[in-house]
Amino acid sequence: MKSWYTIRARDGGAEVLIYDEIGAYGVSAKGFLAELGALSDDAAIDLRLNSPGGSVFDAVAIHNALGRHSGTVTVWIDGIAASAASYIAMAGDAIVMPENAFLMIHDPSGLVMGTAEDMREMAGTLDKIAGGMVRGYAGRSGKPEDEIAALMAAETWFSAAEALDAGLATQLAEPVHIAASFDIARFRNAPPELVEAVEASEPEDDAMVPDIVEDANDVATPPDPEAHDPDHSETDAGKGPDPAAIRAEAIAHARAVVDLCRLAGQPQMAGRFLEQDASLDAVRAALLDAKAEAAPEITPHHPQPGRSAATRPWGDVIARTFKLKG
């Protein structure tokens, strides 16, 4: 199972990397907090962020754990700290942003399926979560809570200079190359220059391919092999196959598999299919089978579906899945 974080011990401290969607792939903050707790209380921590956000509950738990840590916590926003990731950043004693990095804050969002009461309950939960986040951003920046609430409602993106002016960062650094394997287009107000930078970033070697194909948020349209090589000149006898074309086709296939799993609500299955090198038809069939097995069989002897997990497996899972938009 792919993890979204890495914790590396170093002399006198530790380096923590969150370079993916927080809480993705079934790995919750529990493992993160266990590893963090294994560090000495006074260990200096360098937390490096390049994340679109993710689970708000995991982010709050990480933020609070870092806040309790007695050692110095320096947050480095290496590219993007959006949504839940920006809330984690607020736990740093220092928050360093390269001049071309971005930070984003917005209201939490969630999915629910059920009755009107279920939806009212979700709305109340989101209001409580938003209130806690407003206090966190306001406490860090020194801005009034109503001003922070308005910025969150508008989904506000801050450049490094803007974050510094707003009190959400403490130091600027030299620009860095921004690369990300997650889909930045999910956000409604993402800066065009950021979208272009992320879309233009390409893996530099084959060692990066597993990170790309296992990312359930990397959404791309598979290229047309015929459009790439209409006359098949790249595979003529004597020339051999073109490594770049083969690699592009493999990545496109992997991304298509990831997309199918994501749309089916089962991103964790993508890794298994890719290990099996399954065709897209096989992936579709397996996902349909999995959904059919999870769906309840209703017979005349059963009452109409109610609130039990046995009769609403998909709805109950969705109703209890809260995450920041992103």
Image (spheres, rainbow, N blue to C red):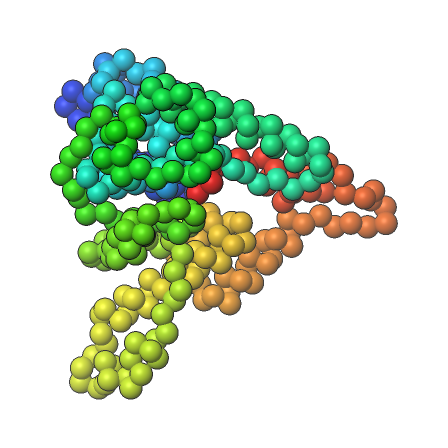
At 30% across and 28% down in the image, what residue appears? 166
At 24% across and 40% down in the image, what residue appears? 101
Residue 271 drawn at (x, y percent)? 41, 52
Q: Is residue 310 left or right of residue 39?
A: right
The residue at the far right in this view is 300
Residue 115: quarter of image: top right
Relative vertical location of residue 162 with respect to residue 189 in this rendering, above or below:
above
Residue 30 drawn at (x, y percent)? 42, 27
- Quadrant of the snapshot with the C terminus: top left
At 35% across and 55% down in the image, what residue appears? 213
Disc tally is: 0
Q: Which of 265 and 74 is in front in this view?
A: 74
Residue 58 seen in the figure:
no
- Quadrant of the snapshot with the N terminus: top left
Relative vertical location of residue 102 with respect to residue 60 in this rendering, above or below:
below
At 24% across and 16% down in the image, what residue appears? 71
Residue 56 seen in the figure:
yes
Q: Nearer the viewer, residue 164 or 6?
A: 164
Residue 313 drawn at (x, y percent)? 65, 42
Q: Nearer the viewer, residue 147 or 299?
A: 147
Q: Is residue 246 left or right of residue 148?
A: left
Residue 82: quarter of image: top left
Residue 302 drawn at (x, y percent)? 82, 44
